[in-house]
Image (tube, rainbow, N blue to C red):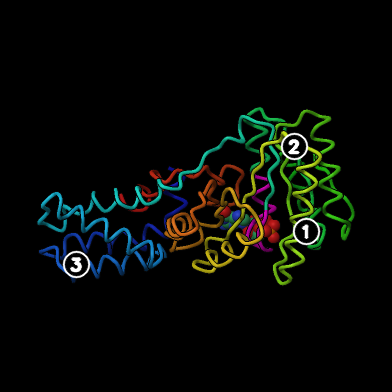
């Protein structure tokens, strides 16, 4: 499938070592667990999450009286899936009038993801509107306008350097007037001035609350999967300033450490809702943890 193909780098990184462990050890002992832990950490699943997965596996080994390392394989995959299922994402916004804020630092793939989402929801028969509220980054507005043409949806944009909250105000008014299903707002990605960013996001949220109180709200953070554990750090910083409801994890096609999706979801307690596995519109995929884990380990 496209998913398996998109995750080739991570799969190649994990698969052979993974197979070696299950065939290379003759008993389930400390060495076996240590080696297993190393492989999971190497795939960027994260120390904390890996430890929980191994602990869970140890319980299952005991309960089921497992003797052979090879017998552990299915239990391990099941443990990873369970670990992820705790924070399974819902896609409620698909059935309600929704305002979606897209946040994240520059370069992670925010504008691209907004464009891809717009194209997909438009193709699914939704009425989509975009708001170009990243008025700070040079070129961000034109880039979004370009994507709006590609996706065949309208965009509300102001001048570069103008007040992002004013753009959102206009976009909300337009969304209501046009009976839009999903209004997707691209926002600025500066993080060097946290107070500033926090105030800006607050102001945008206040305007939506006041002008469109019945709208269903989503705040998606976009994270670059190739930055590994740094993505996790970024997400934690943004979590302090915004009520994040979902994660869009991009560029997983460009990394051998796609296990970061597992770490991020379980360590933040926020569901990964979309993953980016390429440049095309259809390369932004709804995230399903079961298929993801299968694509990496089966
Ligand atoms: P922004 O600054 O956060 O708005 O980032 P952009 O949307 O401009 O994206 C930065 C670069 O990442 C662009 O060249 C995109 O084409 C690329 N990109 C975004 N998502 C993906 C993905 O899932 N896979 C790959 N390979 N590239 C991506």
> Which residue appears at 53% of the width and 46% of the height?
273
- The answer to whether 53 appears left or right of 206 in the picture is left
- The answer to whether 77 appears left or right of 129 in the picture is left
Q: Which residues are magenta?
A: 103-116
> Which image quadrant is residue 39 in?
bottom left
Q: Is residue 110 magenta?
A: yes
Q: Is residue 220 magenta?
A: no
Ligand 1 within 8 angstroms of badge 1 C-beta: no
Residue corresponding to mark 2: 213
Residue corresponding to mark 1: 200
Q: CA distance from mark 3 to mark 2?
A: 55 Å
Q: Is residue 72 above or below residue 36?
A: above
Q: CA distance from mark 2 to mark 1?
A: 19 Å
At mark 3, the secondary structure is: helix
Cβ–Cβ below 8 Å for labels 3 and 2?
no
On the image, the x and y values in percent for residue 247 come to: 56, 52
Residue corresponding to mark 3: 32
On the image, the x and y values in percent for residue 109 come to: 64, 56
- Mark found first going from the N terminus, 3 or 1: 3
Q: Quadrant of the N terminus?
A: top left
Q: Is residue 47 above or below residue 173?
A: below
């Amino acid at each position: 499938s496209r998913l398996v193909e998109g995750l080739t780098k991570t799969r190649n990184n994990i698969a052979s070592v993974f197979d070696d462990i299950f065939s290379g050890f003759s008993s389930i002992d400390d060495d076996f667990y240590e080696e297993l832990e190393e492989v999971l950490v190497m795939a960027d699943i994260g120390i904390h999450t890996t430890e929980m997965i191994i602990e869970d596996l140890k319980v299952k080994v005991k309960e089921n009286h497992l003797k052979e390392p090879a017998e552990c394989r299915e239990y391990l995959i099941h443990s990873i899936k369970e670990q992820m299922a705790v924070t399974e994402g819902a896609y409620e916004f698909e059935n309600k009038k929704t305002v979606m804020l897209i946040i994240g630092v520059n370069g992670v793939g925010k504008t691209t993801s907004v464009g891809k989402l717009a194209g997909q929801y438009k193709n699914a028969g939704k009425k989509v509107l975009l708001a170009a509220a990243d008025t700070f980054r040079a070129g961000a507005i034109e880039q979004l306008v370009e994507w709006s043409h590609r996706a065949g949806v309208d965009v509300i944009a102001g001048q570069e350097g103008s007040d992002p909250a004013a753009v959102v105000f206009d976009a909300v008014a337009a969304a209501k007037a046009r009976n839009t299903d999903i209004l997707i707002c691209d926002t600025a990605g500066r993080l060097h001035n946290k107070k500033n960013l926090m105030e800006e996001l607050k102001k945008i949220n206040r305007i939506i609350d006041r002008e469109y109180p019945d709208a269903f709200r989503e705040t998606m953070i976009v994270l670059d999967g190739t930055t590994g554990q740094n993505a996790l750090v970024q997400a934690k910083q943004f979590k302090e300033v915004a009520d994040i409801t979902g994660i869009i994890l991009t560029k997983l096609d460009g990394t051998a450490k796609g296990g970061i999706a597992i770490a991020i979801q379980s360590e933040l307690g926020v569901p990964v809702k979309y993953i980016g596995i390429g440049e095309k519109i259809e390369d932004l995929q709804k995230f399903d943890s079961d298929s993801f884990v299968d694509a990496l380990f089966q």
